Amino acid sequence: MWAVEPDRALPALAELAVRVGANVQPGQDVIVAGLVEHAPMVRAVARAAYEAGARHVDAWYRDQHVRRALLEHADDDVLTWTPPHLLQWLDDLEKSHGALISIAGDPEPDLFADLDPERVGRARMLALNELQLRQLNDRALNWLIVAYPNEGWATTVFGEPDVARLWDAVAAAVRLDAPDPVEAWRTHIATLAARADALNRARLDAVRFRGPGTDLTVGLNEGSRWLAPSIETRWGTKHVPNLPTEEVFTTPDPARTEGIVTATRPLHLPNEGVTVTDLSIRFEGGRAVEVDASSGADVVRAQMRTDEGAPMLGEVALVDGSSAVGRTGLVFFNTLFDENATCHIAYGSGLAIAVEGTRGLDPDEMQRRGVNKSRIHTDFMIGGPEVEVDGVTSDGRAVPLLRSDRWQLEG
């Protein structure tokens, strides 16, 4: 790993976030969203964005202790309410063809662990979630999620607040340790694009996962196409929404998931302040009918009661053992990283960007085209060396995709 001083890594990561991740363009308005503990990263990103020619950069700070006060004392109907000014802010950003950069890295992952899991699981700004999912599917912003190493997150990963060690791991995961990080990302995205092309040529009808505690078949939408994680806005700006990213992904048919799946990594839910361990879900007719876990099951069940589409799948993604995140050997307790260490699926909203002929359709029309409609989208990790992954064609032929965490499908 790259032994690096955080003071040197911070501006380098901010530069990568702005130039490669969000790909901020001259004249753009930019919102940088993070927790108060993320202030050094927010400031570094703002500086890099202005250096890239941004017209205006604004910071959107949140405080998890304020959120805890809401969870403890607010009326039930307030838990899912969105202040109108937040919707207006993002709507204005969309109208100006702006960029949104969000900072991850939970500084207090157990802050809500002693609270009522039902309230914690329900508490989310539903209208804001709905707007952001719509903007994602409409390619309405060039957006990015990037993480900021901090003491609380380092303690969760290592058992001690070794921030320098976490910086080393993050630098390796986002290829910041490469001689030329920008060129390393160009090469990496090209590799993922080739995989997506090979999957599309295979014309798969379903994907099957088999391993300890897992025998799951995920049927694909008939219009599904596999994508690499380089997205183009509707006005033509290419960006990489997640740093790191190692996946090729598509949208399943929400009615065609069958079987049982067991998570292979813990699932940390920063919005809920809960880590779900040993998650197992059984699906019948596309819907989750049983949810079990050693911890956090009540929070997952509460999420799945959000709306009609919440207990159905909206994404399936493949990641192999060559992942830079996986090669660190760490569990990051951060979905941005852990979902890019191994294969994952997501319950909740489908990704219309991966279904042909859906651009410009409203959510109800997308739903009629087989894109799951929900106001949540939660990824969890289901892959690894012991999990075999096959594609299944419409005539029932199995196409090996992953064996012992190695990619099998030739270009």
Image (tube, helix red, strand yellow):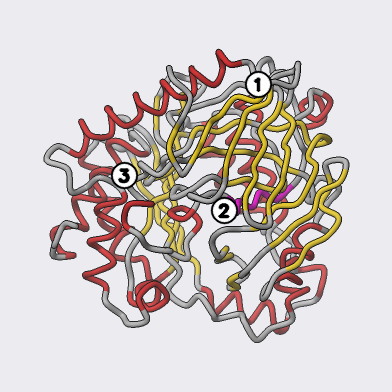
In this view, the residue in front, 56 or 160, is: 160
Say if the magenta span includes residue 218: no
SS state under label 3:
helix
What is the number of the mark on residue 381? 2
**Residue labelled with disc 1:** 204
Extent of the magenta region: 375-382
Q: Is residue 67 visible?
A: yes
Residue 346's place in the image compared with 188, above or below, is below
Residue 167: where, in percent of width, then height?
25, 63
Q: Is residue 18 left or right of residue 311?
A: left
Are the two marked residues, 3 and 2, in contact with CB atoms closer than 8 angstroms? no
SS state under label 1:
loop
Alpha carbon distance from label 3 to label 2: 24 Å
What is the number of the mark on residue 17? 3
In this view, the residue in front, 1 or 408, is: 408
Task: Point out the frontmost of discs 3 and 2.
Answer: 2
SS state under label 2:
strand
Alpha carbon distance from label 3 to label 1: 34 Å
Q: Is residue 372 left or right of residue 196?
A: right
In percent of the image, x 69 and y 83: which residue is there?
A: 115
Q: Which picture quadrant has residue 99?
A: top left
The amino acid type found where label 3 is placed reads Ala
2 or 1: tag closer to the N-terminus: 1
